[in-house]
Image (cartoon, rainbow, N blue to C red):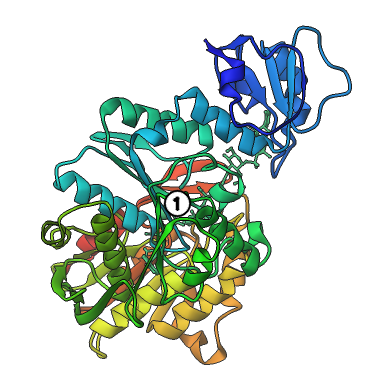
Amino acid sequence: MKALKDILYKVSMNAVSGDTGISISNIQFDSRKVENDDVFVAISGTQVDGHNYIFKAIKLGAKAIVCENLPEDLANGITYIQVVNSNEALAYMASNYYGNPSENLKLVGVTGTNGKTTVTSLLYRLFKEAGYKVGLLSTVKIMVNNQTYNATHTTPDSLTINSYLNEMSDEGVEFCFMEVSSHGIHQSRTHGLTFAGGIFTNLSHDHLDYHNTFAEYRDVKKQFFDGLGKEAFALVNIDDKNGLVMLQNTDAKKYTYALKTYADYRAQIMENQFSGLLLKLNGNELWSKLIGNFNAYNLLAIYATSELLGLDNHESLRLISQLESVSGRFEYLVSDEKITAIVDYAHTPDALKNVLETINSIRTKNEDLITVVGCGGDRDTTKRPKMGHIASALSTKVIFTSDNPRTEDPAKIIEDIEAGVEPQNFKKTLSIENRDQAIKTACQMASANDIILIAGKGHETYQEINGVRIDFDDFEIVQKYLKQLQK
Ligand SMILES: CC(=O)N[C@H]1[C@@H](OP(=O)(O)OP(=O)(O)OC[C@H]2O[C@@H](n3ccc(=O)[nH]c3=O)[C@H](O)[C@@H]2O)O[C@H](CO)[C@@H](O)[C@@H]1O[C@H](C)C(=O)N[C@@H](C)C(=O)N[C@H](CCC(=O)O)C(=O)O
Ligand SMILES: Nc1ncnc2c1ncn2[C@@H]1O[C@H](COP(=O)(O)OP(=O)(O)OP(=O)(O)O)[C@@H](O)[C@H]1O
Ligand SMILES: N[C@H](CCC[C@H](N)C(=O)O)C(=O)O
Ligand SMILES: [Mg+2]
């Protein structure tokens, strides 16, 4: 049991009714999880308003209610706290409840449209190899040093974040790298955390269903940097024009990285091949097994962060050169018949363009590039034609297929993608709704030295159709068909 008034430290309150001296058991923001002596935080969401469940929470045993709007009839014996912002209140309460664990370790947040999983996961591995206890909160998985947990979100809710940070702190974890999504910032999931640093990778088209306009999306990302303290560092990619925007109002120490312009951390690409990248990085040579220009940015961010966190430069260059690609990010295999299959999580127009340009820059013109791609349902519909346009313009052949349709009709999603194909590229495209069959067809179409790119789902091991997740793994499927089709 914990004292409610201690949990409310820093929470901005408008009114209090009842006793805040009471002890509470747990914090809940979902009425369905409430048990005796809990405090229920009512949040107005995108689907329903948590305020409608206050009475239900009380029936299940809630002793205290935190809400933005007080109900008309206040129940006897219940403490009501009216707050300015329920999401922010929840974030402070979660942090207080777990003893402010973000202060016990060096927490680094990575934000941007693409590259967050790559940068956080590789930083996790780098610092582990350097001998530290490390934590990771990422799209792919959560790590508390050596313990693995499944991830449900890129940035979990504030209670979950603080619970993992608490476990990390108990384990003696010194560094934690976490992805900070725009949804996470907007819903204050990271509010009140003490960050040792923040990294901005890039900004391009995504999530415009949620944020309405690109400017709104950018400003949400900027809020993360506005919230950093003066002891923290803010490290931004200034080849992206939004990099400097992120630094405009931050108190943090400012650092920049770039390939194309002068910056604190800069690199030149000396070689870019299928076997990896050779970079000149702040005067040092760095060989990496990672592939593609965009990974040069990720490597720069990783190197800069390791220096800002105090790692020896030569040691970190040595360790970075040993890092392998992250699961589902440019993961590839070469079949006995010399067909290369690449599985990549590119699910935004920019990521797809980067990955296709990378493949085109390292393949010879007589090899075909066959792309299999779809778009997720219940997500930004405006990125669909853009992805259709890019895939058909930059590949020799394209098969449009289903991604995670969620509650949408996959055929309709494919139509949206096809709408972006320019007439001269029509003949390169075909559509096969069944993703398994689409991958099989790509394997049948390919001959020796051709490259198959399967984009959009990367590490995912499921396909979500109408709320049900069926087993589905792009990598396993392409591996299976390439083997089966061996002559
Ligand atoms: C659009 C979105 O971000 N939604 C998140 C949000 O849910 P919501 O606002 O829709 O919640 P709601 O259903 O309207 O309910 C409002 C409140 O009423 C409560 N409630 C509801 C029903 C009930 O019976 N009782 C009750 O108390 C709910 O617990 C909630 O507190 O808050 C929930 C709790 O934190 C999240 O789980 C949920 O993530 C959904 C599942 C989701 O799919 N989110 C995706 C879009 C997301 O967050 N993605 C980002 C980024 C991905 C990227 O960058 O590529 C991520 O960080 O993962
Ligand atoms: N720095 C980068 N710039 C542009 N594209 C990138 C970069 N890094 C990775 N990508 C591309 O974006 C895809 C997704 O990368 P990654 O998973 O690291 O991004 P993310 O920001 O974590 O995405 P999400 O928003 O889904 O969590 C990769 O598979 C690759 O195609
Ligand atoms: N974090 C991203 C992942 C998209 C992956 C893609 N496979 C899809 O399902 O749309 C999102 O939730 O928008
Ligand atoms: Mg991610």
Residue 290 at what x, y percent from top left?
22, 66
Disc 1 target residue: 230
Q: How many labels does the image show?
A: 1
Q: Which of 320 and 314 is in front in this view?
A: 314
- Taking the image as shown, residue 255 lies to the left or right of residue 322, namely right
Picture quarter with ligand 1:
top right
**Relative to 31, residue 62 above or below:** above
Residue found at x 63% / y 68%: 215
Residue, far top: 77
Residue found at x 42% / y 70%: 351
**Relative to 374, residue 447 above or below:** below
Residue found at x 50% / y 61%: 402
Q: Badge 1: few (under 14), some or many (20 or more) residues near its Cα, within 10 Å?
A: some
Q: Which of 348 and 100 is in front in this view?
A: 100
Element under disc 1: loop
Q: Can you see residue 404?
A: no
**Quadrant of the image occupied by residue 221:** bottom right
Residue 315 at what x, y percent from top left?
11, 57
Q: Can you see residue 163?
A: yes
Residue, far right: 72
Q: Nearer the viewer, residue 275 or 392?
A: 275
Mark 1: amino acid: Lys
Give the quarter of the figure containing the C terminus: bottom left
Indicate yes or no: mark 1 CB to ligand 2 under 8 Å: no
Residue 390 at what x, y percent from top left?
48, 79
Q: Nearer the viewer, residue 249 or 390?
A: 249
**Relative to 237, residue 389 above or below:** below
